[in-house]
Amino acid sequence: TCRSIHQLAYAACGYRFRQKLAGDELKAEDVMSLRLFDSLFSAGGEGATQPAKRRRRSAGDADDALQRMEGVEACLATLRGFLNSADMFLSDKHLPHPLPGPLADGSIAQETVCDVAKELWRRMCDANDGEVKMTHGCYLKLYSLSRPQLKYDLVMLDEAQDCNPAIACVVTSQSCARILVGDE
């Protein structure tokens, strides 16, 4: 039997999300209107440091729209960092590096970006939440987190140099023979 890691992941858990499957990645322009990102720019300043609150302009201003887009992009990049990792939990180590402008200048707190990314992850994993789509990378991460034990005599990973740690974790944790093939 020959199956890809995505076929295994879809059969194990991805099928539960078929009605909300979006594709490879969420795009900032598709999700930036979601209310969950409002906490990045809350009126009480929870997502921003004091100097940044003083720099903020009126709602609807082009600078606000740009900052919102950058904040959403930072949350999505943080989520992608987690999805591609072998880690069990999303944390500040998944923040993008170098830090994008709003995080680097303190106008958005790193902790807030992580909190919003965690909420985005939670909502992606909720099969009944049709507002936040599921991606192939997300159900692959769910599969990796389940620590599957494959019932095969041999697991082979081709293009091993291109796989992410979430996939590598699935392959290397198997008790059967494993062959990893890749370029130098």
Image: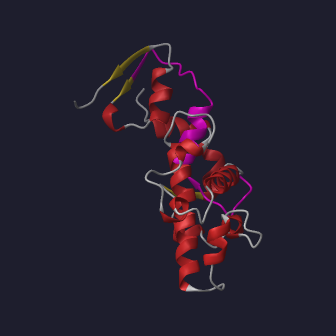
Please name the colour scheme applied to the rendered image: secondary structure
State left or right for residue 158 relative to residue 7: left
> Is 95 inside the magenta-drawn segment?
no
Q: Which of 119 and 107 is in front in this view?
A: 107
Q: Is residue 90 above or below residue 109?
A: above
Which residue sits at x=54%, y=71%?
Answer: 69
Q: Position of residue 109 (x, y in %)?
A: 63, 58
Report the magenta residues as a range.
127-155
- Name the residue furthest left: 184
Would residue 18 be seen by someone viewing this image from the given angle? yes
Q: Position of residue 92 (x, y in %)?
A: 58, 45
Q: Which of 118 and 149 is in front in this view?
A: 118
Which residue sits at x=58%, y=72%?
Answer: 68
Which residue sits at x=53%, y=19%?
Answer: 151
Q: In which quarter of the image is the N terminus?
A: top left
State left or right for residue 7 relative to residue 12: left
